[in-house]
Image (cartoon, rainbow, N blue to C red):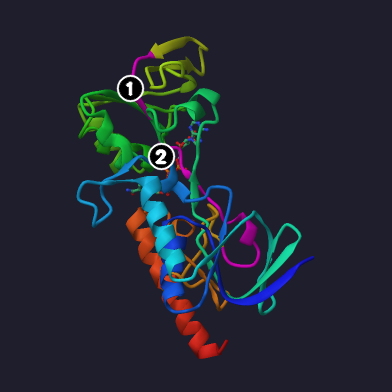
Amino acid sequence: MMTEEIRDTIIVGTGCAGLTAAIYAARSNLKPLVLEGHEPGGQLSITTLVENFPGWPEGIQGPQLIENMRVQASRFGTDFRMGHLTSVDLSKRPFALHVGKDALHARTLIIASGASARWLGLPSEHALIGHGVSSCATCDGFFFSGKEIAVIGGGDSAMEEALFLTRFATKVTLIHRREHFRASKIMLDRAIAHEKIHFMTNTAVDEVLGVEQKEVTGLKLRNVHTQETSVLPVSAMFLGIGHVPNAKMFAGQIDLDDDGYIRTENNVYTRVPGVFACGDVQDRRYRQAITAAGTGCMAALEVEKFLEEHGR
Ligand code: NAP
């Protein structure tokens, strides 16, 4: 086993939150080490044009925005390291993080491991991500102006996506696998009342059509009761079937809520002093690049304060 020096701070995650934390920590001369997990760049790296990040009036491609943040973090002395975190021990100080056979040690930890959109898991869906299949209406809805769109899911996210997409689409078909909805009454009522939104319940998506054309042309659907299949011509499919926070690794050591999100107080404090969480791994509500960046900044500032108070 290789043991490295004790770092002032290790940041887990290279999405918007982690990289913003790195920029701030590096500029405070903390020489942060950033661990890149299995989705380098986080959700922005699978987004196309980002038009709502302040400072980019013409928009910027998600992967480019992330690359810019990475360059900015490197410029001030951030170290990056690839590798999957296999275990952590937050019961001792310094904290220990294991990446395969290597042990890393840090006085403070910033968890910015994000959340991954839940997907249906169909090969055709995977092949068309970024070509009409999306999990972010705010990011990609605009590209389907004047088109017919499908939204999958029966919770508040799906209602919210469907309502948002009515700004662009001529018709939004909301497809849900059951008869009953998890969505709050107010959101559901709003969606039902909207003239552009049509509902298909008890319906599963068996295949996304258009793999050969490299763009979504429709969905192959199945009624889950009758097994009858049909084709719905649409130009895009938006998933609103929830997110999965990437926090399992920390279960038992810091508090997670019922859905697995890290519980924080005062924005970024976990129950372990010196361990902070930021971005989508602790935010089930806003989930925006800019809010992730904001909490990433807060986490780095708290690390600096913690190290000042507790010494290095
Ligand atoms: P959710 O409430 O867990 O709903 C997920 C929906 O996706 C469910 O209807 C579920 O179907 C469906 N689903 C899950 N996996 C599926 C699969 N493999 N195939 C097809 N359908 C699938 O998740 P959410 O809508 O993201 O909401 C999460 C939390 O955030 C909730 O507490 C919600 O209230 C909150 N939220 C609030 C707002 C708001 O107030 N503006 C907006 C967004 C989210 P089943 O019902 O059959 O399980």
Q: Say the numbered circle drawn on residue 221.
A: none
Q: Quadrant of the C terminus?
A: bottom right
Where residue 245 appears, as percent x and y from the top left, is 52, 52
- Residue 158: x and y, percent? 37, 37
Which residue does the image show at 50% across and 35% down from the upper left?
119
Task: Find numbered disc 2 in the image and state the secondary structure of the residue it sits on.
Answer: loop
Residue at the farthest front position: 75
Q: Position of residue 305 (x, y in %)?
A: 45, 84
Residues drawn in magenta: 232-255
Measuring 52% from the left and 58% from the top, which residue is drawn there? 13
- Inspect the image, locate mark 1, and give the three-letter code of the amino acid beneath it: Ser
Q: Quick check: which quadrant has ligand 1?
A: top left
Query: Image check: 46 left or right of 140?
Result: right
Q: In the depicted view, which residue is nearer to us: 29 or 155?
A: 29
- Total marks shown come to 2
Q: Residue at x 64, y 58 (%)?
A: 249
Residue 299 figure quarter? bottom left
Q: Quadrant of the N terminus?
A: bottom right
Question: Disc number at residue 155?
Answer: 2
**Residue 116 rendering spot, x and y as whole percentages:** 50, 46
- Callout 2 crowding tier (Cα within 10 Å): few <14, some 14–19, many ≥20: some
**Ligand 1 within 8 Å of the CB at mark 2:** yes
Alpha carbon separation for disc pair 1 and 2: 22 Å
Callout 1 touching callout 2 (CB < 8 Å): no
- Amino acid type at circle 2 is Gly
Image mark for residue 235: 1
Vertical placement of 163 versus 295: above or below?
above
Which residue is more in the foreground, 148 or 158? 148
Q: Is residue 112 above or below residue 303?
A: above
* Residue drawn at x 51%, y 57% as measured from the top left: 261
